[in-house]
Amino acid sequence: MAKKPANKSQIEYKGPNTISKSTSSGSVGKLLFVFAILGGLLAFYVYKVVTTPPDLPKYDVNNWWGPYPIDQQKDVSIRPFKIEFSDVIVNDLRERLMHRRPFVPPLEGTGFDYGFNSNFLGQVLHYWENKYNFKDRQNFFNKFDHYKTNIQGLDIHYIHVKPKVSADIEVLPLLMLHGWPGSIREFYELIPKLTTPRPGDNFVFEIIAPSLPGFGYSQSPARKGFGPVETAVLMSNLMKRVGRTQYYIQGGDFGHVIGSTMATLFPEQILGFHTNMPVNTSPVAMFYLWLGSLWPSMLVEHEVQDRVYPLREHVARLLQETGYLHLQATKPDTLGISLTDSPAGLAAYILEKFSTWTNPEFINASDGRLLDKFQLTHLLDNVMMYWAPNSIATSIRTYAEIFSTRTLTMRLDDIPTDVPTWGIKFKHELLFFPDCLLRLKYKNYLHSTMVEEGGHFAAFEMPDVMAKDIFEAVKTFREFHGNERTPSPKDKRIKTIYDFTVKDLSGKEIKLEKYKGYVVLIVNVASQCGLTDTNYKQLNELYEKYSDKGLRILAFPCNQFGGQEPGSAEEIFKFISNRGVKFDIFEKISVNGENAHPLWQFLKNSQSGMIGDFIKWNFSKFLVDRNGVPVDRFAPTVSPLDLESYLVKYL
Ligand SMILES: *[C@@H]1O[C@H](CO)[C@@H](O)[C@H](O)[C@H]1NC(C)=O
Ligand SMILES: *[C@H]1O[C@H](CO)[C@@H](O)[C@H](O)[C@H]1NC(C)=O
């Protein structure tokens, strides 16, 4: 036994020897060189293929999706429609609920972690059968005006709310797109908030909220191939039918996918896209997201890194929550049969999502904490939007079309759009993408609102937060269209740092006009950072050397990076006195997030970072010229003395 390895190593030893005898070292070099070139070319090719946007997918705006034969005489008028929970529907439903078989009890100690808890489902079904007031709910649904109209062979159902307001208030059309397993019901609390004028805003919305084809009361396509592009075309045709050629879009979940596709195909129609599921699933973005595991702060601000990293944990949650997706994308009709036949199965299947997609922590509770955030009546309303029109089977086919090879090869997320886009990111949303990756797709991604609670069904769960955010987004979209060239669409009047006022360490207001005519270096500082020593020392040196040539240094203490500037104003003052700091130090501020100081917002908008605009760490530096315009930005690791060569250009 001991001999064998020795033998082996002899043989191995011979190999290279033989080669080096028969080949000169020069040709090995040549060979390596050729490989390097080929490798480089291959890498470049892959890079090119991945980063070159594909062509816009082809589509036919008149394609017929109804049953054949095509009916050229089809009635294309707009017909009023009412939702009806008829006696036939209600009696049949009650009958089924009454005669269901007993459920197998849940395992000891399980909540929703094995799926919908069958004990709790018993209570839900009892309520549905005995307490849910079908007549009341029918009236509730009909409190908005509903319509149907035939588009491309399909009868499409939608809510249309036209607000009545005084002449000085502008009415803006907003297309609201629901997802799966949601419905138009998700928007009922939100709609009145969008159609009522708000103090300070001179506009309200006219709401068009369709049931997507195959969902709710909208007819389902009769044949394969009705994917996101075809849905987007049909929705655009619906908007034309109601007389709107330019409008805003709000969407989440599948509504995001359709909204995003419409923004890609019809940028001239979409004035702005508001999404509560801002994602970019292009391979490049996914690759960066994965790469970000190595150095999260390159991609994501420190405060929200836990929304996506460690990636392993988030992928684990995704796997746990998306088994349904695989099934729906591959064998929708098998699933559709059972859900169509059983209200118990349907309620469990749909409502399970409202538990763990709203908050992953709900998973261990025996009631999935469904009633923490929603009322049972409201949840069952949403189930009724699948039960009454018998649309669950057709709704889940959508997944087979989204994840078909045909749709995936269109690479829709690789085609950029200029439509101004605004995201709101709720804490427990299933997917999180940093702004810099969203910008790869949405060239005018204007803003992310960060919400420290809330989940996937945001319109339903937090209508107030959503309404406020939609108003703010559209206000910004309007400013954007007013003047596209300004660096900060949020405040287009502001062009120089002289428009800002800051506070010094004693709290006194200082107008930055004071620095007119000087070259200004603006830095965020921290007393306890690893970079503190070099930076303070070198900033001082820099100041001493160039102050009489017109340099001013403005330092802003900030505690947002690992809590390295915890002190009070007095402590900071003591710290800088001890170091003989000669340049100007101001009050402690935030540089990132909702409460970031406006001056810093402006700086960040004017000079983007390498990846993402936010400030990565203590001692980021902005250089402002003698006219008050930010002209350059430097990373924390660039030490102040390295800046000399840049400074002198402006001094
Ligand atoms: C649920 O319970 C399991 C096992 O008891 C535990 O490991 C897990 O952390 C719990 N999850 C949550 C979100 O509370
Ligand atoms: C900022 O300060 C911390 C703590 O001293 C240090 O660990 C970190 O390296 C500094 N930042 C950078 C980008 O070096």
Image (cartoon, rainbow, N blue to C red):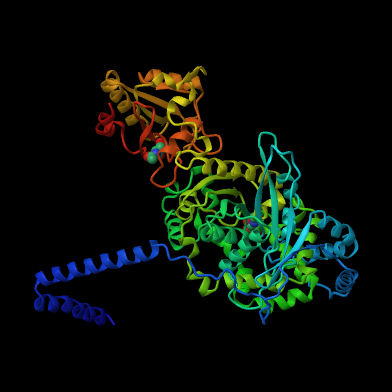
Pick the residue in front: 258 or 435: 258
Q: Quadrant of residue 260?
A: bottom right
> How many numbered marks have been drawn onto this rendered protein structure?
0
Q: Residue 475 placed where, x, y %?
A: 60, 41
Position of residue 442 in the picture relative to residue 21 (left or right): right
Quadrant for the C terminus, please: top left
Position of residue 76 in the picture relative to residue 259 (left or right): right
Q: Residue 300 placed where, x, y %?
A: 48, 47
Pick the residue in front: 576 or 606: 606
Quadrant for the N terminus, please: bottom left
Would residue 93 be visible to someone looking at this image?
Answer: yes
Position of residue 561 in the picture relative to residue 21 (left or right): right
Q: Is residue 613 above or below residue 621?
A: below
Which residue lies at the image location 44% right of the left edge and 25% below the top edge?
Answer: 498
Q: Quadrant of residue 80?
A: bottom right
Would residue 110 be visible to someone looking at this image?
Answer: no
- Which residue extends farthest front? 73
Pick the residue in front: 191 or 287: 191
Pick the residue in front: 193 or 75: 75
Q: Residue 392 placed where, x, y %?
A: 72, 71
Q: Residue 294 placed where, x, y %?
A: 41, 53
Which residue lies at the image location 47% right of the left edge and 65% below the top edge?
Answer: 56
Q: Quadrant of ligand 1?
A: bottom right
Position of residue 595 in the picture relative to residue 637 (left or right): right
Q: Is residue 74 above or below residue 450?
A: below
Which residue lies at the image location 58% right of the left edge and 70% below the top edge?
Answer: 227
